[in-house]
Amino acid sequence: KKSKKSFGDRIHSLSDHFRGVDDELLEEIMVILLESDVGIHTAQKIVDLFSERSKEIKNYDSMEDYFIAILKDFYNEDPSDIIHYNTEGPTVFLMVGVNGSGKTTTAAKLMQMYKDVEFNVAVAAADTFRAGAVDQIEEWANRIGVPCIKGKPNQDPSSVLVDACRYAKTNNIDILICDTAGRLQNKSNLMKELSKMNRVVAREIEGAPQEVWLVLDATTGQNGISQAKIFMEAVNVTGIILTKMDGTAKGGVVLAIRDQLHLPVRFLGLGEKPEDLCPFELDNYLMGITKGMDQNAE
Amino acid sequence: MAFESLSDRLNKALKNITGQGKLTEKNMNDMLKEVRMSLLEADVNYEVVKNFIADVKEKAMGQEVMESLNPGQMVVKIVHDEIQELLGSEDAQLNFKKQGITTLMMVGLQGTGKTTASAKIAKYCTKKMKRRVLLVACDVVRPAAIQQLQTLGQDIDVDVFTMGADVDAVTTAEEAMKYAQDRQKDLVIFDTAGRLHIDEALMQELSDMKASIQPDNIVLTVDAMSGQDIITVARDFNEKLGITGLIVTKLDGDARGGGLLSVRSITNVPVLFVSNGEKMDDLEAFHPDRMADRILGMGDVMTLVEQA
Ligand SMILES: Nc1nc2c(ncn2[C@@H]2O[C@H](COP(=O)(O)OP(=O)(O)OP(=O)(O)O)[C@@H](O)[C@H]2O)c(=O)[nH]1
Ligand SMILES: Nc1nc2c(ncn2[C@@H]2O[C@H](COP(=O)(O)OP(=O)(O)OP(=O)(O)O)[C@@H](O)[C@H]2O)c(=O)[nH]1
Ligand SMILES: [Mg+2]
Ligand SMILES: [Mg+2]
């Protein structure tokens, strides 16, 4: 408790009495990162950066600002790296991820988002496996007012995607969102099935899927790294959608994933309603992580 | 990224020690640093790790270890046993009423596996314990949550009670109890909507349900992939509801599952079942020794033995 208090004192107004980076401060930084699920290896890297560049601290108004600057450099955002769209036909988004991470709900949120800007949107119910999965996506599609292409229970999900791609081409669809069944990345047969789905989409529409979203639950710990790695091997994952950020988890494993696999975060899920999706904004996100500083300070 | 097993690491740490002669407090600290690292990689909450390391150190500094020929193995054993003890015992059971209808409320964060686990337990109790089970669809939030439970109920041949998505969860639960009485059911399982521990309105809904049904079991689902924050979640659920048991889900994945240790340290309630797949038979008894191996990254051997 004692050390936390003194740390709190050091957060604001560095200019006056900042005495330098000491072990105690580095330990506090480490704890904030660990509590955010950044993971010990990545956290250590960031702490080292924090310490190496500590002379720069004086250029910032607060410790928080300095910390965010370090994290920002670490994340190394690439402004030229943007969401791809198909200019010659339907743009296809493939939703992938482990069980229960929020794929279907996020598909609904994307439908809403693109519909709001007057795109022609359709959704493919390619989770033909889980009980109630088709009903779930269909209900969202109906509520939002978007056509839903579905198959029969236990139908090969790839064939549903073929139907959906053909529907999209003949019906002038701008955005086709493909919901897939949740799968744990260590199930190699299910990962093969996913690769096949990716392939048939590519065969039907050139350059598709334009984006493959790995939907990652913010409460996930270090397993997120394994998820990103193995899903990237199976399909061409282009970005992460980090869900359940309306809770108290920080989803810091995305920093480890960014470091090791260079995968960007694209959107945050902030609730269970179709409007609860917002584009990923690095500064805000990092501010959320450093919030631990104030909490710890109390 | 392959995780090094704890034994490998301790051996490495020990290599540095050989040549220095006796095992000292400093050497011990090096080893404990490796233990700490390994537990953090397994997603054990860092506060829990801190306390754990302090306990282990006390035990490990005892004469026995200091003088043993293979202190690395000794430390592994102490760590393993300590974790196993923290995880609790093998033979935890659901609380069954001697007479009348036993009730179970399934609670937890969104997408952690409540509905699936509700149905699996229903099947297990029907088949293995000859119970007359009723599943109750109290998730009126998530689209098609009711259909999901109904489909599972059909698959396992268990009755599912629902009043549709327009009737609130508490009313549905109360009506389900009357229905269960009429049909002479003796186990009623309430599947509830996933919710965040900080969602006051929905947490209140569970408190209201609890007050009305007075469930014999309130079971929290813990996703094996959970990170550091699960400790906050478990604390809140437990403070507001009084959890009686845990189910660890998605253990068929490759997560080490250290979050379970965090939850155990906060709630001190038993782990009742392991959920390890999407199929209705993928429900197992909990083995703390195997779970300890897994958290420490030593589980592969055991799993292979099991599968053979
Ligand atoms: N609080 C919160 N809940 C969310 C969010 N996104 C999804 N959920 C909830 O998480 C649960 C699982 O979401 P789904 O969209 O069904 O997840 P999924 O990945 O499609 O699940 P499977 O298809 O079974 O693998 C549901 O209860 C959703 O309402 C979010 O951003 N915040
Ligand atoms: N691989 C695996 N998947 C599981 C397990 N338990 C549940 N699932 C899957 O995880 C996803 C979510 O499971 P649900 O039972 O719908 O979870 P829930 O807690 O009821 O979700 P909400 O009601 O939305 O909060 C589904 O895809 C399930 O098939 C498990 O032990 N292993
Ligand atoms: Mg889904
Ligand atoms: Mg459910």
Image (cartoon, grey):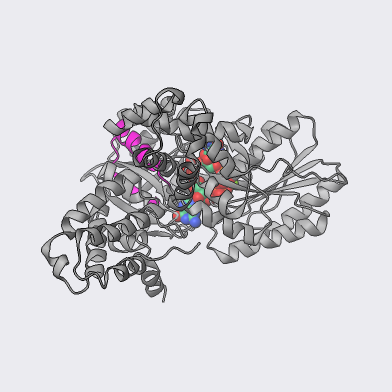
Provide residue A23's location: percent of width, then percent of height. 35, 42
- Image: A203 above or below A248: below
Query: B61 or B301, which lies in front?
Result: B61
Q: Measuring 74% from the left and 28% from the top, which residue is drawn there?
A: A116
Q: With A150 as the anchor, is B194 left or right in this view?
A: left
Q: Quadrant of the N terminus of chain A?
A: top left
Provide residue B148's location: percent of width, then percent of height. 53, 45
Q: Quadrant of residue A195?
A: bottom right
Read off the magenta span.
Answer: B227-248
Query: A64 or B275, which lies in front?
Result: A64
Q: With A216 as the anchor, is A40 left or right in this view?
A: left
- Image: B162 above or below B14: above
Is B234 a magenta residue?
Answer: yes
Provide residue A110's location: percent of width, then percent of height. 68, 37
| Count of marks, rendered view | 0
Q: Measuring 26% from the left and 73% from the top, which residue is drawn there?
A: B19
Q: Quadrant of residue B91?
A: bottom left
Residue B186 visible, this angle:
no
* Residue sticking out furthest to the bottom: B308
Q: Measuring 46% from the left and 57% from the top, which residue is drawn there?
A: B280
Q: With A74 as the anchor, is B242 left or right in this view?
A: left
Q: Quadrant of residue B88?
A: bottom left
Q: Quadrant of the C terminus of chain A?
A: top left
Q: With B19 as the anchor, is A225 left or right in this view?
A: right
Provide residue B299's location: percent of width, then percent of height. 37, 66
Is B159 a magenta residue?
Answer: no
Residue B52 visible, this angle:
yes
Q: Measuring 30% from the left and 46% from the top, which residue is drawn there?
A: B48
Query: B252 or A235, which lies in front?
Result: A235
